[in-house]
Image (cartoon, grey):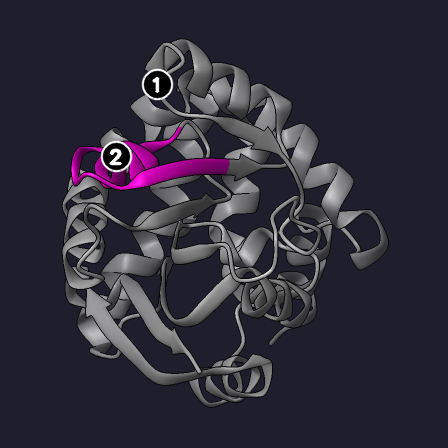
Amino acid sequence: MDHEHLDTMSAVLPPAETKARNVRQMFDRIAPGYDRMNRLMTGRLDQRWRREQVRRLAIGPGDVVLDLACGTGDLAELALSAGATVVGADFSRGMLRAGRERHGGRIPFVQADGNRLPLADGSITAVVCGFGLRNFASIPAVFAELARVVKPGGRIAFIEVDTPQNPLVRWGHSFYFNHVVPLIGGLLSDRQAYRYLPKSVVYLPPRDELVRILHDAGFHRIQKQQLGLGAAQAIRAVRR
């Protein structure tokens, strides 16, 4: 990695000691237009990916579902429609405000960080999380906290960005994600936020390390599914 690229990355990505505060403030700023930008940037594929993960976890009546880093509650709404009892948790007050306005009180939302959830041990049967993993200050701490609140046999699913393996697809994805997304984000929302979001993929551990962290936290039957020709991924696991 060249020095110029390192300088660009350091200018966009917050240092570890201020990451949580900076990311929270960023999501507070972009909350009013966040859903519209997601649909625009992914061509509404984000909604298809969310529906698929709710289906793959077989969420339905009898489940108590946590939508972690819920934003405005896309996944919470899908789980509720499937008959589950749902709670959404996010550390951004702006996102929670937008979620309450959007859902009109049908979904309970709580402000909480992923490594300190106001939930009882073993109280959750399924966890869903859309594009939030790379924004946590400590991924191992979040997985450990999920192991506490998820009952044995409970299921989790994370949707995240990824890097395509095919060289041609990877080049196109890199150009779009690192140049087009910040340009559109700057015009329609918040330039700094949409410079950060593409770069924040560096916070994601490699697959083998992610599997190890999940296993050490107490999960097994870990699966990774490619989405969108490898531009995104779904990570699923079961609580031991």
Report the residue at 60% width, 76% height from top.
1
Report the residue at 51% width, 80% height from top.
214
Q: Nearer the viewer, residue 160 or 194?
A: 160
Is residue 143 toward the left or the right of residue 208 in the image? right
Return the residue found at the far right: 17
Which percent across, then down, holds residue 85? 33, 38
Report helix, strand or loop for mark 1.
Answer: loop
- Mark 2 and mark 1: Cα distance apart in space: 9 Å
Disc 2 target residue:
80
Q: Could you say which disc has been placed on residue 106 in the image?
A: 1
What range is drawn magenta here? Answer: 73-88
Report the residue at 66% width, 62% height from top.
4
Report helix, strand or loop for mark 2.
Answer: helix
Q: Nearer the viewer, residue 75 or 81?
A: 81
Which percent across, then down, holds residue 7? 71, 58
Which percent across, then down, holds residue 35? 34, 25
